[in-house]
Image (spheres, rainbow, N blue to C red):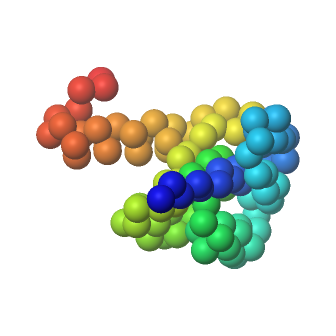
Amino acid sequence: MIIMYKIGVVGDKDSILCFKAFGFDVYPVSEFETEENRKIIDKLAREGYGIIFLTEQIAHSLSETIDRYNKELTPAIILIPSNAGSLGIGLNRIRDNVEKAVGINILD
């Protein structure tokens, strides 16, 4: 049995609209609506999204929600920079995961 997961992108409108061209579902949100953003992430997880791309600016205020989903198989929450640039949060998460998997930091 093949399971087809959906891919969603959550972030500010200017940063995520281009993902629509790839067929991803986009959810424009405001950086200042933390509770509403949390509800959107939870809704996407309930609706069977396998991957949720989330801009670092939005993720900055949702660390508790992201940590909760890190313990689950799906959805995979992937942090991406917005059009304003990177905060380094996504790269730090990748570094931490590689170090956890390999035992040392091989990316520096």
Q: Quadrant of residue 30?
A: bottom right
Left or right for 63, reference 16? left
Q: Position of residue 102 (x, y in %)?
A: 18, 37
Q: Quadrant of residue 92?
A: top left
Q: Quadrant of residue 22?
A: top right
In the image, residue 48 above or below residue 78: below
Residue in front for this viewpoint, 65 or 50: 50
**Residue 58 in view:** yes
Residue in front for this viewpoint, 50 or 107: 50
Residue in front for this viewpoint, 20 or 53: 20
Left or right for 30, reference 99? right
In the image, residue 43 above or below residue 84: below
Q: Position of residue 26 (x, y in %)?
A: 78, 51
Q: Position of residue 1 (x, y in %)?
A: 47, 59
**Quarter the C terminus occupies:** top left
Q: Position of residue 90 (x, y in %)?
A: 50, 42
Residue at far front of view: 1
Left or right for 44, reference 99? right
Residue at 67% across / 32% down in the picture?
A: 85
Residue at 61% across / 60% down in the picture?
A: 49
In the image, residue 103 above or below residue 49: above
**Residue 11 in view:** no
Residue at 74% across / 58% down in the picture?
A: 31
